Amino acid sequence: MRNPVSTSGVPTNTVTIVQYGTRQGHKSEVYLNWGIYGRPDEPIGMDYFVWLVETPTGTILVDTGFSREGGANRSRTFLAHPVKALAALGVDAATVPEVLVTHAHYDHIGNLDAFPTARVTISAAERDFWSSGMERRAQFHHSVEDAELETLRRIEAEGRLRTFDDELEIAPGVRMVRVGGHTPGQSIVLVDTAEGTVALASDAIHYYEEHDDDVPFAYVADLPAMYAGFDLLHAMVTDGRVQHLVSGHDPSTLDRFGRIADGPLPGLTARIG
């Protein structure tokens, strides 16, 4: 796949990690069957992110965060509303051309209606699942807002929804790959940058502990597929296809990549590339 490059031959895509929310919980809440590991229950934070990919051909937003309603229904804490956070970074939601949805949980599609002109890309398996009737079951419905699923369907009716099966090139040096597990269509996004390839794991890996210790998240549609997603990302890091693994919710994420202390969102962003 051809990378977008400068005249010096260096890829020019960049990734900005934007934290917009947070909450506190315990490991017994966030990991599946935590008691089988013989470890004590401990407090654990959960941070919430959207990811901004800047390419030579335009801006790509990965996920849209939770809405005020979705956050309030689950007692989540805003640090900055995602749309306002993007505006502070110079990105106008009304004109964003491309939104990638890694999966359709409330904290990833909560503000889709703020992006009225964007093409929205989601895996076909994810789109199909949330219209299958299975979304009404309590174990799945807990993680979604009905109004937000309706927004996704409206976007499809408007002709702005693009789906894919297993993998799709979004732009030169930007790929979306379905891994499943957490949800049937859970996807990751791979971005080539001047600092190496970034894997935006989203909820394929909520926490680095999942990746390091093989500890699945509590909410899972297909456990073998979740484990297979761990294996795929392990292999990508080990064989050098990925240089930067970005978790979906780990509170250490921004510090791992250099939290930006000044600027329009002090302490809430990090940049790669």
Image (cartoon, grey):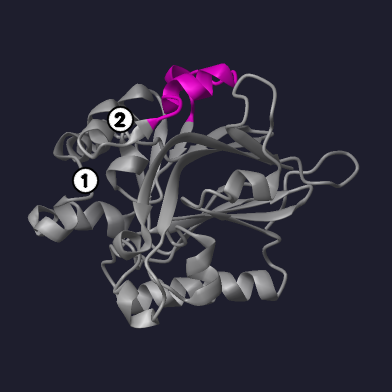
The quarter holding residue 16 reads top right
The disc at residue 210 is none
Residue 131: x %, y % from top left: 15, 51
Q: Looking at the image, which residue is at 34% across and 60% down?
A: 30
Q: Is residue 242 left or right of residue 151?
A: right
Q: Quick one: label 2, few (<14), some, or many (20+) residues within 10 Å?
A: many
Q: Looking at the image, which residue is at 49% across and 28% down?
A: 97
* N-terminal label among 1 and 2: 2
Residue 162: x %, y % from top left: 37, 45
Query: Which amino acid, mark 1?
Result: Val
Query: Which amino acid, mark 2?
Result: Ser
Q: Is residue 30 left or right of residue 176?
A: left
Q: Is residue 177 above or below residue 141?
A: below
Reply yes or no: does residue 217 show up in magenta.
Answer: no
Magenta segment? 78-97
**Residue at mark 1 to residue at mark 2: CA–CA distance:** 11 Å
Split into 4 quadrants, where in the image is the N terminus? bottom right
Residue 240: x %, y % from top left: 72, 70
- Residue of label 2: 67
Split into 4 quadrants, where in the image is the C terminus? top right
The disc at residue 144 is 1
The quarter holding residue 83 reads top left
